[in-house]
Image (cartoon, grey):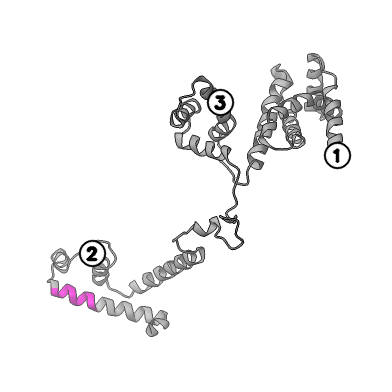
Amino acid sequence: MIQDSIERNFIRAAMTAPYLEREEEQALAVSWRERHDQEALNRMTVAHMRLVISMAAKFRNYGLPIGDLIQEGHVGLLEAAARFEPERDVRFSTYATWWIRASMQDYILRNWSIVRGGTSSAQKALFFNLRRLRARLSAGSDTLSNATIYQEIATTLGVPEADVATMDSRLSAPDSSLNAPLSGEPDSLERMDFLVCDDPLPDEVASQAIDVERRTIWLKDALGALNPRELRIIEERRLKDDGATLAELGEAMGISKERVRQLEARAMEKLKVALVARNPEFMAA
Protein backbone atom coordinates (compact mmCIF):
# COMPACT_ATOMS: atom_id res chain seq x y z
CA MET A 1 0.00 0.00 0.00
CA ILE A 2 2.80 2.41 0.87
CA GLN A 3 4.54 1.65 -2.42
CA ASP A 4 1.30 2.24 -4.35
CA SER A 5 0.83 5.57 -2.60
CA ILE A 6 4.38 6.64 -3.44
CA GLU A 7 3.87 5.70 -7.09
CA ARG A 8 0.59 7.62 -7.29
CA ASN A 9 2.17 10.72 -5.78
CA PHE A 10 5.14 10.46 -8.15
CA ILE A 11 2.88 10.10 -11.19
CA ARG A 12 0.69 13.01 -10.03
CA ALA A 13 3.72 15.24 -9.57
CA ALA A 14 5.15 14.25 -12.96
CA MET A 15 1.89 14.92 -14.77
CA THR A 16 1.60 18.40 -13.25
CA ALA A 17 5.21 19.43 -13.97
CA PRO A 18 5.38 22.53 -16.18
CA TYR A 19 6.09 22.19 -19.90
CA LEU A 20 9.25 23.68 -21.34
CA GLU A 21 9.14 26.23 -24.11
CA ARG A 22 11.31 25.45 -27.11
CA GLU A 23 13.87 28.16 -26.29
CA GLU A 24 14.06 27.15 -22.62
CA GLU A 25 14.48 23.49 -23.54
CA GLN A 26 17.25 24.41 -25.97
CA ALA A 27 19.07 26.45 -23.33
CA LEU A 28 18.85 23.64 -20.76
CA ALA A 29 20.12 21.09 -23.28
CA VAL A 30 23.10 23.28 -24.15
CA SER A 31 23.86 23.88 -20.47
CA TRP A 32 23.83 20.15 -19.75
CA ARG A 33 25.85 19.19 -22.81
CA GLU A 34 28.55 21.84 -22.47
CA ARG A 35 28.79 22.35 -18.69
CA HIS A 36 27.18 19.16 -17.28
CA ASP A 37 24.78 21.33 -15.30
CA GLN A 38 22.90 18.84 -13.09
CA GLU A 39 20.11 21.33 -12.42
CA ALA A 40 19.54 21.69 -16.17
CA LEU A 41 19.40 17.90 -16.56
CA ASN A 42 16.95 17.61 -13.67
CA ARG A 43 14.59 20.21 -15.16
CA MET A 44 14.70 18.52 -18.57
CA THR A 45 13.92 15.06 -17.21
CA VAL A 46 11.21 16.21 -14.78
CA ALA A 47 9.45 18.08 -17.56
CA HIS A 48 9.42 14.95 -19.75
CA MET A 49 8.47 12.34 -17.15
CA ARG A 50 4.85 12.59 -18.35
CA LEU A 51 6.15 11.21 -21.64
CA VAL A 52 7.67 8.24 -19.78
CA ILE A 53 4.45 7.61 -17.87
CA SER A 54 2.34 7.84 -21.00
CA MET A 55 4.51 5.30 -22.79
CA ALA A 56 4.58 2.98 -19.77
CA ALA A 57 0.78 2.90 -19.87
CA LYS A 58 0.93 1.59 -23.45
CA PHE A 59 2.94 -1.43 -22.27
CA ARG A 60 0.84 -2.21 -19.20
CA ASN A 61 -0.77 -5.26 -20.82
CA TYR A 62 2.45 -7.27 -20.64
CA GLY A 63 1.88 -8.08 -16.98
CA LEU A 64 4.83 -6.14 -15.54
CA PRO A 65 4.60 -3.54 -12.75
CA ILE A 66 3.92 -0.05 -14.08
CA GLY A 67 6.44 1.33 -11.59
CA ASP A 68 9.20 -0.82 -13.06
CA LEU A 69 8.30 0.28 -16.58
CA ILE A 70 8.50 3.91 -15.49
CA GLN A 71 11.92 3.35 -13.94
CA GLU A 72 13.19 1.73 -17.13
CA GLY A 73 11.71 4.57 -19.15
CA HIS A 74 13.53 7.05 -16.92
CA VAL A 75 16.78 5.26 -17.71
CA GLY A 76 16.01 5.70 -21.40
CA LEU A 77 15.20 9.36 -20.78
CA LEU A 78 18.59 9.90 -19.13
CA GLU A 79 20.31 8.10 -22.02
CA ALA A 80 18.53 10.39 -24.45
CA ALA A 81 19.68 13.45 -22.49
CA ALA A 82 23.26 12.20 -22.60
CA ARG A 83 23.15 11.77 -26.39
CA PHE A 84 20.94 14.71 -27.38
CA GLU A 85 22.50 17.24 -29.76
CA PRO A 86 20.79 20.63 -29.34
CA GLU A 87 22.34 22.02 -32.52
CA ARG A 88 20.20 19.71 -34.65
CA ASP A 89 17.15 21.83 -33.81
CA VAL A 90 14.95 18.86 -32.88
CA ARG A 91 12.63 18.87 -29.91
CA PHE A 92 13.98 16.76 -27.05
CA SER A 93 10.68 14.90 -26.66
CA THR A 94 10.88 13.68 -30.27
CA TYR A 95 14.41 12.39 -29.75
CA ALA A 96 13.77 10.94 -26.28
CA THR A 97 10.71 8.95 -27.36
CA TRP A 98 12.85 6.39 -29.19
CA TRP A 99 15.19 5.85 -26.22
CA ILE A 100 12.31 5.56 -23.73
CA ARG A 101 10.50 3.02 -25.88
CA ALA A 102 13.68 1.00 -26.52
CA SER A 103 14.49 0.87 -22.82
CA MET A 104 11.01 -0.33 -21.90
CA GLN A 105 10.95 -2.91 -24.66
CA ASP A 106 14.30 -4.33 -23.60
CA TYR A 107 13.02 -4.58 -20.02
CA ILE A 108 9.85 -6.36 -21.15
CA LEU A 109 11.79 -8.84 -23.28
CA ARG A 110 14.12 -9.62 -20.36
CA ASN A 111 11.36 -10.08 -17.79
CA TRP A 112 8.17 -11.07 -19.58
CA SER A 113 9.16 -14.73 -19.56
CA ILE A 114 11.78 -16.89 -17.85
CA VAL A 115 12.61 -18.17 -21.34
CA ARG A 116 14.63 -15.64 -23.28
CA GLY A 117 13.33 -14.94 -26.76
CA GLY A 118 15.08 -13.45 -29.75
CA THR A 119 16.56 -10.00 -29.28
CA SER A 120 17.09 -9.09 -32.93
CA SER A 121 15.18 -6.13 -34.35
CA ALA A 122 12.97 -8.51 -36.36
CA GLN A 123 12.13 -10.61 -33.28
CA LYS A 124 11.36 -7.46 -31.26
CA ALA A 125 9.03 -6.21 -33.98
CA LEU A 126 7.30 -9.61 -34.03
CA PHE A 127 6.90 -9.71 -30.25
CA PHE A 128 5.40 -6.23 -29.93
CA ASN A 129 3.24 -6.26 -33.09
CA LEU A 130 1.95 -9.82 -33.33
CA ARG A 131 -1.16 -9.35 -31.20
CA ARG A 132 -2.12 -6.11 -32.91
CA LEU A 133 -1.66 -7.50 -36.43
CA ARG A 134 -3.48 -10.72 -35.57
CA ALA A 135 -6.42 -8.82 -34.12
CA ARG A 136 -6.61 -6.59 -37.19
CA LEU A 137 -6.56 -9.53 -39.59
CA SER A 138 -9.10 -11.50 -37.56
CA ALA A 139 -11.42 -8.49 -37.43
CA GLY A 140 -11.39 -8.24 -41.20
CA SER A 141 -12.55 -11.83 -41.66
CA ASP A 142 -13.68 -14.61 -39.34
CA THR A 143 -12.76 -17.32 -41.82
CA LEU A 144 -9.01 -16.77 -42.04
CA SER A 145 -6.98 -19.79 -40.97
CA ASN A 146 -3.93 -19.57 -38.72
CA ALA A 147 -1.72 -20.44 -41.66
CA THR A 148 -3.06 -17.48 -43.67
CA ILE A 149 -2.72 -15.13 -40.71
CA TYR A 150 0.85 -16.27 -40.08
CA GLN A 151 1.70 -15.76 -43.74
CA GLU A 152 0.29 -12.22 -43.75
CA ILE A 153 2.12 -11.27 -40.54
CA ALA A 154 5.38 -12.82 -41.77
CA THR A 155 5.16 -10.81 -44.99
CA THR A 156 4.35 -7.59 -43.14
CA LEU A 157 7.20 -7.90 -40.64
CA GLY A 158 9.72 -9.66 -42.88
CA VAL A 159 10.19 -12.74 -40.68
CA PRO A 160 9.79 -16.49 -41.37
CA GLU A 161 6.32 -17.96 -40.89
CA ALA A 162 7.77 -20.49 -38.45
CA ASP A 163 8.92 -17.62 -36.19
CA VAL A 164 5.39 -16.16 -36.25
CA ALA A 165 3.87 -19.51 -35.25
CA THR A 166 6.41 -19.98 -32.45
CA MET A 167 5.87 -16.48 -31.07
CA ASP A 168 2.09 -16.85 -31.25
CA SER A 169 2.37 -20.05 -29.23
CA ARG A 170 4.53 -18.34 -26.61
CA LEU A 171 2.15 -15.40 -26.28
CA SER A 172 -0.90 -17.67 -26.04
CA ALA A 173 0.20 -19.79 -23.10
CA PRO A 174 2.12 -19.19 -19.85
CA ASP A 175 5.54 -20.68 -19.15
CA SER A 176 5.55 -24.24 -17.86
CA SER A 177 8.25 -25.65 -15.63
CA LEU A 178 10.07 -28.73 -16.89
CA ASN A 179 9.89 -30.04 -13.31
CA ALA A 180 6.11 -29.72 -13.13
CA PRO A 181 4.37 -33.11 -12.67
CA LEU A 182 2.22 -34.30 -15.56
CA SER A 183 -0.56 -35.26 -13.16
CA GLY A 184 -1.62 -34.36 -9.67
CA GLU A 185 0.07 -37.41 -8.16
CA PRO A 186 3.17 -36.67 -6.00
CA ASP A 187 5.32 -39.28 -7.74
CA SER A 188 4.10 -38.68 -11.28
CA LEU A 189 6.50 -38.16 -14.15
CA GLU A 190 7.78 -34.69 -14.98
CA ARG A 191 8.19 -33.10 -18.40
CA MET A 192 11.94 -33.32 -17.88
CA ASP A 193 11.66 -37.11 -17.91
CA PHE A 194 10.68 -37.04 -21.58
CA LEU A 195 13.59 -34.85 -22.72
CA VAL A 196 16.05 -37.57 -23.65
CA CYS A 197 19.36 -36.68 -25.27
CA ASP A 198 21.63 -39.37 -26.68
CA ASP A 199 24.58 -37.03 -27.15
CA PRO A 200 27.70 -37.64 -25.02
CA LEU A 201 27.96 -35.79 -21.73
CA PRO A 202 30.08 -32.61 -21.72
CA ASP A 203 32.88 -34.26 -19.72
CA GLU A 204 32.97 -37.13 -22.20
CA VAL A 205 33.23 -34.71 -25.13
CA ALA A 206 36.05 -32.80 -23.42
CA SER A 207 37.88 -36.02 -22.52
CA GLN A 208 37.62 -37.30 -26.07
CA ALA A 209 38.93 -34.02 -27.50
CA ILE A 210 41.91 -34.11 -25.14
CA ASP A 211 42.64 -37.75 -26.02
CA VAL A 212 42.50 -37.05 -29.75
CA GLU A 213 44.86 -34.10 -29.41
CA ARG A 214 47.30 -36.12 -27.27
CA ARG A 215 47.30 -39.08 -29.67
CA THR A 216 47.86 -36.77 -32.64
CA ILE A 217 51.00 -35.39 -30.99
CA TRP A 218 52.24 -38.91 -30.18
CA LEU A 219 51.70 -40.08 -33.76
CA LYS A 220 53.44 -37.02 -35.22
CA ASP A 221 56.49 -37.68 -33.04
CA ALA A 222 56.53 -41.41 -33.93
CA LEU A 223 56.35 -40.68 -37.68
CA GLY A 224 59.71 -38.96 -37.33
CA ALA A 225 61.31 -42.42 -36.94
CA LEU A 226 60.43 -43.37 -40.53
CA ASN A 227 62.50 -42.74 -43.63
CA PRO A 228 60.87 -40.83 -46.53
CA ARG A 229 59.76 -43.96 -48.41
CA GLU A 230 58.22 -45.55 -45.34
CA LEU A 231 56.54 -42.28 -44.41
CA ARG A 232 54.98 -42.02 -47.87
CA ILE A 233 53.61 -45.55 -47.65
CA ILE A 234 52.07 -44.96 -44.22
CA GLU A 235 50.55 -41.67 -45.31
CA GLU A 236 49.08 -43.14 -48.51
CA ARG A 237 47.93 -46.41 -46.96
CA ARG A 238 46.98 -45.56 -43.36
CA LEU A 239 46.44 -41.82 -42.94
CA LYS A 240 44.04 -41.10 -45.79
CA ASP A 241 40.33 -41.83 -45.88
CA ASP A 242 40.65 -43.57 -49.25
CA GLY A 243 43.92 -45.43 -48.81
CA ALA A 244 45.84 -46.55 -51.89
CA THR A 245 46.08 -50.25 -52.68
CA LEU A 246 49.42 -52.08 -52.65
CA ALA A 247 49.32 -52.32 -56.45
CA GLU A 248 48.54 -48.60 -56.95
CA LEU A 249 51.27 -47.51 -54.55
CA GLY A 250 53.80 -49.97 -56.01
CA GLU A 251 53.18 -48.64 -59.51
CA ALA A 252 53.52 -45.04 -58.34
CA MET A 253 56.80 -45.80 -56.52
CA GLY A 254 58.22 -48.12 -59.18
CA ILE A 255 58.36 -51.20 -56.95
CA SER A 256 56.33 -54.38 -56.62
CA LYS A 257 53.27 -54.54 -54.43
CA GLU A 258 54.99 -57.21 -52.34
CA ARG A 259 57.83 -54.79 -51.65
CA VAL A 260 55.28 -52.16 -50.63
CA ARG A 261 53.76 -54.67 -48.20
CA GLN A 262 57.16 -55.43 -46.68
CA LEU A 263 58.02 -51.75 -46.27
CA GLU A 264 54.63 -51.08 -44.72
CA ALA A 265 55.09 -53.90 -42.21
CA ARG A 266 58.54 -52.59 -41.26
CA ALA A 267 57.20 -49.04 -40.91
CA MET A 268 54.35 -50.19 -38.67
CA GLU A 269 56.86 -52.01 -36.44
CA LYS A 270 58.98 -48.83 -36.22
CA LEU A 271 55.90 -46.82 -35.23
CA LYS A 272 55.05 -49.30 -32.51
CA VAL A 273 58.56 -49.18 -31.07
CA ALA A 274 58.57 -45.36 -31.13
CA LEU A 275 55.16 -45.11 -29.46
CA VAL A 276 56.02 -47.62 -26.72
CA ALA A 277 59.32 -45.89 -26.05
CA ARG A 278 57.48 -42.61 -25.48
CA ASN A 279 54.46 -44.14 -23.74
CA PRO A 280 55.26 -47.44 -21.93
CA GLU A 281 51.60 -47.88 -21.03
CA PHE A 282 50.99 -48.95 -24.66
CA MET A 283 52.82 -52.20 -23.86
CA ALA A 284 50.10 -53.13 -21.40
CA ALA A 285 47.41 -52.44 -24.00
Amino acid at pointer 3: Ala
Q: Nearer the viewer, residue 13 or 42?
A: 13
Magenta-colored span: 258-265
Point out the frontmost of discs 2 and 3. Answer: 3
Which residue shows up at 67% across the image and 38% down it? Answer: 107
- Which residue is denoted by mark 2 in the rendering? 243
Q: Residues within 10 Å of mark 2 (few under 14, many from 20)?
A: some
Residue 156 visible in the current orientation: yes
Q: Nearer the viewer, residue 228 or 179?
A: 179
Q: Nearer the viewer, residue 75 or 270?
A: 75
Point out the frontmost of discs 2 and 1. Answer: 1
Amino acid at pointer 2: Gly
Q: Is the C-beta separation of discs 2 and 1 under 8 Å?
A: no
Which residue shows up at 63% across the image and 43% down it? Answer: 113
| Mark 3, secondary structure of its residue | helix
Amino acid at pointer 1: Met
Q: Earlier in the sequence, mark 1 or mark 3?
A: 1
Distance from the alpha carbon under mark 1 to that under mark 3: 36 Å
Percent coordinates x, y for residue 274 in the rendering: 35, 79
Which residue shows up at 87% across the image and 30% down it? Answer: 9
Q: Left of 82 or right of it: where is 208?
A: left
Percent coordinates x, y for residue 92 in the rendering: 73, 21
- Which residue is denoted by mark 3 in the rendering? 135
On the rendered image, what quadrant is the N terminus found in? top right
- Which residue is denoted by mark 1 in the rendering? 1
Q: Earlier in the sequence, mark 2 or mark 1?
A: 1
Q: Residues within 10 Å of mark 1 (few under 14, many from 20)?
A: few
